[in-house]
Amino acid sequence: MNYRNRTCAFLLAVVACIYAPASHAVLIDVFASTHSTGGGAGAATGIVLATGDAFSVSVDADDLWSAGQLPRWSNADGLNTTLLATGSDDSGLPAGTQIGAAFGNLDLFGLSLPYGTLVGSIAGNFFALGTSFSGAAVAAGELLLWYWDSNLFDNAEFVTANVERIGGGAVPEPTTLALLAGALGLVGRHARTPRQGPGVIAVPFARPGSVLGDTVL
């Protein structure tokens, strides 16, 4: 591949990188108290989605948080079943101690979910996430994460959510568009430049009778 073709290939690669789909993953600590739907604020993920963008959220099933006095420990799926301490879990209680139970559902924002469920919201639209979620954004905006509860004051601990935006890079900034235009311009200029054979020297055009160096034409 000659120099001109290599240059064009490089510039095209730059263009491809600018528009290549991008995945972006972050780890977010979601606190049962601070980020409670019962008076707290959603945990900001920094991931801004357009409607229909694909994303996923996952939490270790052994990662626990609490809605208050026993037995109110659960994972991100919420207080929907009997849960026994393992002796090494976040409750710190002896193995076999009942630390969780089903407490029914809490009705908020048009949803009915078990207390202690990890939920997400985008532009005020709430949806269940639990320990594993994969789907499309229901609205445009930043993804926030919450602890599903009606009272934040006796909540404790947090879970760590792995949040990943799948493909669909952000809208290009003006500087990115300028770089793209420049790259495309260089590609076009190289494509239009006449190709010279080996050993051919380009000589400026001169009219008969003019002087080029020491030679009269």
Image (spheres, grey):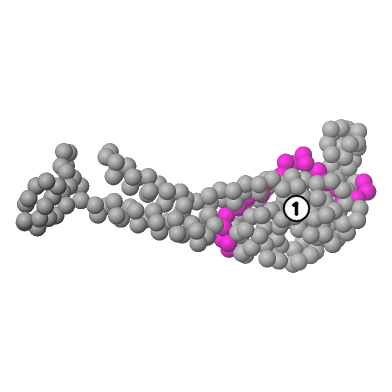
Query: In the rendered image, which quarter is residue 63 located in?
Result: top right
Give the image location of residue 82, x and y in percent.
84, 44
Answer whether residue 74 is visible to the viewer in this image.
Answer: no
Dot 1: few (<14), some (14–19), or many (≥20) neighbours within 10 Å? Answer: many
Q: Is residue 120 left or right of residue 80?
A: left
Towards the viewer: 74 or 27: 27
Q: Image point 84% across, 39% down: which residue? A: 90
Where are the magenta residues, as a range? Answer: 50-70
Magenta stretch: helix, strand or loop mostly = loop
Q: Position of residue 151 (x, y in %)?
A: 88, 59
Most distant residue in the right direction: 69
Q: Considering the numbered disc 1 on the image, is that residue within a helix, a strand or a loop?
A: strand
Q: Is residue 77 above or below residue 87?
A: below
Of the pair 183 and 93, the residue shown nearer to us: 183
In depth, the one of 5 and 72 nearer the eye is 5
Instruction: Give the residue drawn at x 54%, y 57%.
Output: 170
Residue located at (77% from left, 45% from top): 159
